Amino acid sequence: MTKPPSSPRLSLILTLLVAAQFVIVLDFSIVQIALPTMRTELGISLANSQWIVSAYGLTFAGFLLLSGRASDLYGRRRLFGIGLVVFALSSLAGGLAPSEAVLIGARAVQGIGAAIASATGLSLLVVTFPEGRERNRALSVFAAVSSAAFAAGVILGGVLTATLGWRSIFFVNVPIGIMTAVTANRFLVESRGDISQRRLDLPGALSVTAGLSILVYALTNAANEGLLSLQTLAPLALSAVVLAGFVVIEHKSSAPLMPLSFLRRGAVFSANALAILTISAVSAMIFLLTIYLQQIQGYSALSAGFAFLPTALVFLSVGGYLSAKLVTRFGARPVLLVGMTIQAAGFLLLNQLSVETPYLTALLPAMLVVSLGAATSFTAFNIAALSGARKGEEGLASGLINTSTQVGGPIGLAIAVTIVGVVVASLGASVTPAAATVEGFRYAFLGGAVLSGMGIIFASVIRSPRTVVVPKEPILEVPSSLLPSVAEPDISVAMRKILVAVDGSENGERAARTAIGFARDYHAELDVLRVVQSPSAVTPSSPRAGGAGSAILKERYDYAEKEAETYVNSVVSKAKSAGVSVAGGTVIRATGPPANAIVETAKKDGADHIVIGTRGLGASGRLLLGSVSAGVVANSGVTVVVVR
């Protein structure tokens, strides 16, 4: 049996993994700020400059799922180190690039290295940290660092470009990547996943990457040559053929990169579509405003970096903290609707852009509105995507939403530069070049509003869990007529396993009796759950923490847990006496919100219905006060029966 790592070793491992994630995310925003300087020095056109960003995003997206599968077969530590070395060496090549073609090629290889390191890094975190408090803390740090990296990139990109030149933004990756790879090889323990299926879907990865790259190339040509030119239509047709080939490959593959049956699920498809639309619009905004600030309004690279700092802080605070709280309180669907609406409003404000738009009073407010909407939606569509996964599919769902996020950037940039190119060409010499470019930007921002509007449509069709409210009477017997949606002969809502959350109160008693009636009438299994809340200092993993005070608290909560077990056993006995054939009880000690513990337990146990009581709150009361039942309704993916 492998001895679990000590706390100092775990801290070092977490530092290694988040350092790799930091530099990978940093590479997006740090390059954006340096783009105008790169264009000037290497003579790159506006349309072609988006390839410096897109080449990285396309290979990152195309090889993300493949990298996760390869790490299961060949070892996560080994692939993690290889990914970091590839990332570091391609960064060195990018910093030394003498031409546009070499730089874009280096960025493409850099994306492959980033995909390998990112996919295996998250897997290593999950297998290294034990499930529960330690893993949740590690995942929180991992997510926070990802948000912080974007904020750091806009500043570091400006500082390095202004002081050491644009090449330094690539050189900074080299020592970090090499040192992290060497240290990881020394301290990480090798691990592998399920290797019963040893086939890698390399044709799928290559075809989707090639198809998307050709699509971006076609849109780039549209910006330069026109929408109806042969140089645009021919690669468009070729991209359609290659992407259709990808679908055929995935349909016939025994180990598909992207199982099409999984993607066809409504919630999964809508959440991934939202990811593509959101990132497409926001990536285009950052790209165009970087050009606007430096080449239209004359900002230095450093000043442009500071101009983006407020929006980065919005992503850090709202995306890293507030959005998750909102989803917990209200559910993913309403948060997504609000977020996409705010984002659309922000792009309509950006549509008012002019050559002389003031930063503080006009441009910054619009940027903040877009960022607020996008940051609000970001966590919500990730949660929605993962909630569509069944037990054992969490890795697939996570990989797919990450892929959609990476695909969105190149697609958004390609659409934006196409719009700008078409508008500039249509204006010709009738206006100044600066005015023509800004007019193109305005139409591109209008396109961002359209993408956000499409996001509102997808958000509206994400299904919330079915919620049925059972009135206070009758208490002892609950006829099936009170649940018309369950009573209908629909196998998709048949009761097989019911989890009832009880707390010893009157409404908890009512919920227990309701659940017993359902379990008896529908011949379902019954799981009685009681959540005992306690501070983290008195959890079983730290019985000695805090000295005498914690010892007293621990004794108190141990007693509460024993009382809870006695109560749960009494409910189980009543259920068996009432004719429920399979009934069991569970008591868990949680330091977080009880609603989260209830939802996680239901998912882990495979419950298809949750029964819970509410303290007489109506819909508005639950919305405003955030009761436990409201939290369960908002975050559960199964039918929730609320008894009051």
Image (tube, rainbow, N blue to C red):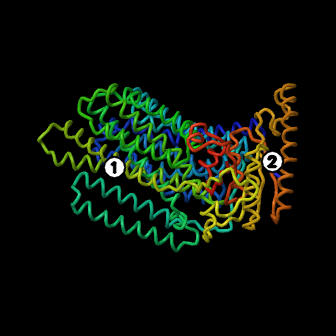
Residue 607 falls left or right of residue 353: right
Horizontal and vertical percent position of residue 604 = 71, 55
Q: Is residue 192 visible?
A: yes
Question: Which amino acid type is shown beneath numbered disc 2?
Answer: Val
Residue 132 falls left or right of residue 96: right
**Element type at mark 2:** strand
Query: Can you tell which quarter of the image residue 520 is in?
Result: bottom right
Q: How many marks?
A: 2
In depth, the one of 150 and 460 nearer the eye is 460
Label ID, residue 516: none
Horizontal and vertical percent position of residue 509 = 77, 49
State the separation of the CA atoms marked 1 and 2: 49 Å
Residue picked out by circle 1: 450
Query: Can you tell which quarter of the image residue 191 is in?
Result: bottom right
Q: Nearer the viewer, mark 1 or mark 2?
A: 2
Q: Is residue 393 above or below residue 601?
A: below
Residue at 49% of width from left, 59% of height from top? 269
Residue 544 falls left or right of residue 342: right
In depth, the one of 22 and 600 nearer the eye is 600
In depth, the one of 336 and 159 nearer the eye is 336
Question: Which amino acid type is shown beneath numbered disc 1?
Answer: Val
Q: Residues within 10 Å of mark 1 (few under 14, many from 20)?
A: some
**Element type at mark 1:** helix
Residue furthest to the bottom in view is 252
In depth, the one of 377 and 157 nearer the eye is 377
Residue furthest to the left in view is 430
Residue furthest to the front in view is 473
Q: Residues within 10 Å of mark 2 (few under 14, many from 20)?
A: some
Q: Is residue 177 visible?
A: no
Horizontal and vertical percent position of residue 112 = 50, 52
Residue picked out by circle 2: 587
Dot 1 or dot 2, earlier in sequence: 1
